[in-house]
Amino acid sequence: MHMTFRILIVDDESAIHEVMLVYLKRFLDDFELLVASTGQQAIEMASKLLDEGHSPDIVLMDMKMPAMDGIECTKELSEIGVKNIHLLTAYFDPDAAKQAAEVGAKGVMRKSEGFASVARKVADLIRGTKEPTTQTSPS
């Protein structure tokens, strides 16, 4: 069965959405990029997807956003059942990484690595999750 991967990017800078789309196309053939500019919007989009029986395959979450930050948004998304959330951060902060893990984030990616690198990691993660994730894997 062929699956289109759904990648949700949550970032208040729309330039990031565009850059990531360009790089993701280099590494993945079949994906749908969903973009949200605020945490609230991300939660609404994810809820709608979940209602339709599709969870985003991976979420890239900006750490620093106005109104609702990445930590708060990750916590809310985790609570409604979104699994594969990775935080995108401009400057790495071990405390933030710890907080991120506490609210259910799977990892942290640094924007400073460059978006090509981030996109490659996303592609690798997605390719690693091709199997339906019904079986419970050890966390």
Image (spheres, rainbow, N blue to C red):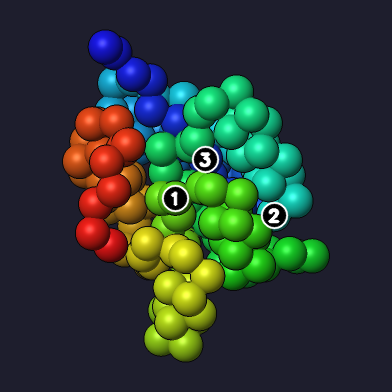
SS category of the residue bearing label 3 = strand
Residue lying at the far right of the rendered structure: 67
Left or right: where 137 falls relative to 115? left
Nearest the viewer among 7 and 117 is: 7
Give the residue pinned by disc 2: 39
Q: Earlier in the sequence, mark 2 or mark 3?
A: 3
Give the residue pinned by disc 1: 83
Seen at 51% across and 47% down, the residue is 82
Q: Which mark is residue 8?
A: 3
SS category of the residue bearing label 1 = loop
Q: CA distance from mark 2 to mark 3?
A: 11 Å
Q: Which mark is residue 42?
A: none
Nearest the viewer among 66 and 131 is: 131
Which quarter shows the N terminus? Answer: top left
Residue 48 in percent (x, y) is at: 67, 31
Q: CA distance from mark 1 to mark 2?
A: 16 Å
Mark 1, residues whose alpha carbon is within 10 Å: few (<14), some, or many (≥20)?
some
SS category of the residue bearing label 2 = helix
